[in-house]
Amino acid sequence: MGNIAPVIYGLLPILLVFALEPMYRDPLYQKTLDEVPRMQLKKRLFGFFHGISMMGEAQVPLVGLVVIFNLVHKMKALYIWSAFGLICFFNTGILKSLYEESRPFWLSDEIVPQKCRRDFGNPSGHCMTATFFWLTVYLNKYFEVGAARPKVRSIFCTAYIIKMGLTVAMCLFFIFLALSRVFLGEHSYNQVLFGSSLGITLALTMHFFLKPIVKRFPLWLRTVYGINKERGTFNVPSYIFLITLCAFIIAPIGLAYLVWVSTNAFILDPNEENRIRTHCYNYLFFFTDAFHNKSFFQSGIIGISGGALIGHLIEMKFVQINLSYGIWNKTSIVKTVIRLTLTLLVYGIFSLPYFTISTDIDDSNIAYLFLAKFFTPSFLSSIFIFAFGRVIFYRLNLINEKALGGIFETLNEENDDSSDQTDNEGSGEKRGKNVSLEFMEIEMASRV
């Protein structure tokens, strides 16, 4: 029962969010149709809400993933990459097709959208993915599982003020992002509420219940030796690759395909079709990436998760670079900027098909769009960065030399990327390293 309890505690909030959604769906949708035409009369607010909406685009968190890889503990980066890919997949590939809810401008001639939107609207992808990503980054910084939290000596200390400032800024951003999607006519109140609540709930539950499993993953594959168990190697059997491939690529894609097939009989109301054509007149085959079709080929974003996980396994089994996961990227500003630039360059090269391949083609090319435009770029970029990124930076002397030989060290790497959280006011003492409880458990078990 002890092993089942965390699963239950993690699922209950998510199920509650889904259970509450039908209760406010229709009233809030009707409220949107009544209020948005009056809201859009205030033209001066368009630029503000358009800028906020742009900050919620998926490209912003994708750039953030590159920054995270170069700044934080590698296992934390692996969790954020894989979790974000899963959230994007469930939003675009599963939930929108299952709910089949129209966007407000499909139903009202008085609502003018910011741009042509040809996929379903519930839940809001901007709200769901942005809230999940930024809240996950915030939790990783200030509420890391298993990490010692520094005591706050005063509410006037710099660290506490920064933390509270970021908290307020994040909450305001979430609120204004949801309002911007409604103001621009692309979502209803219920859609942004559902997307935001899902993103926040998933970020919290996955951070506290799933992330600890990801962080301990290398320990399960570690074979230690030496007097103090300070050396070892990773034993990654082939079936681990097969399980990862099935769980994070084959199964999600199969699920998205089943959802696509089951919703293929959807018939759009003629009035809605005319309104969509009014704003999508530049697209010859607008049905190709509308409704269930767009949801299916966008499900290729799952390549972010599968590529990151398989790439990490490749590094463990074949590359076997002996670099500490925690401090390998703790370098000077110059080296960090060079690493960021190179990683963004690689990510951009692999992502070229996404920006160059047009979706304005007929239905017979759905599989081509899925593979070439979405899955292949996301999968190859993730697998390359996590499999070969660190060894390339090592060859270019862009890593922290103190990390060499430290992948099996018995010292805790958990606090290496969170030292700036410590309040040093009134004290000149340097932060010392704590012994890792996880590696202590291995040593104690071996001695017993």
Image (cartoon, helix red, strand yellow):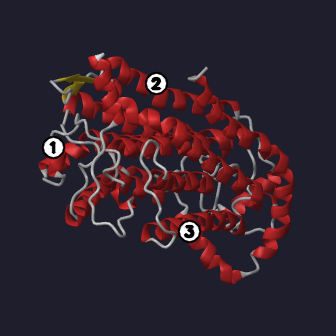
Residue 109 placement (x, y as % from top left): 81, 66
Which mark is first along the chain, 3 or 1? 3
Residue under the point 74% across and 75% down: 40
Q: Residues within 10 Å of mark 1 (few under 14, many from 20)?
A: some
* Extreme residue toward the bottom, this view: 44
Residue 80 placement (x, y as % from top left): 44, 46
Three-letter residue code for mark 2: Cys
Residue under the point 40% across and 58% down: 63
Q: Is disc 1 in contact with disc 3, using a CB cutoff of under 8 Å?
A: no
Vertical placement of residue 112 versus 60, above or below: below
For the N terminus, give its image quadrant. Answer: top right
Q: Which residue is mark 3?
A: 169
Q: Residues within 10 Å of mark 2 (few under 14, many from 20)?
A: some
Name the mark on residue 246: 2
Q: CA distance from mark 1 to mark 3?
A: 38 Å
Q: Which residue is mark 1?
A: 404
Residue 437 placement (x, y as % from top left): 35, 34
Residue 263 in the figure: left or right of residue 36: left
* Extreme residue toward the top, this view: 448
Which mark is first along the chain, 1 or 2? 2
Residue 32 seen in render = yes
Which mark is first along the chain, 3 or 2? 3
Residue 275 appears in which quarter of the rendering? bottom right
Three-letter residue code for mark 3: Ala
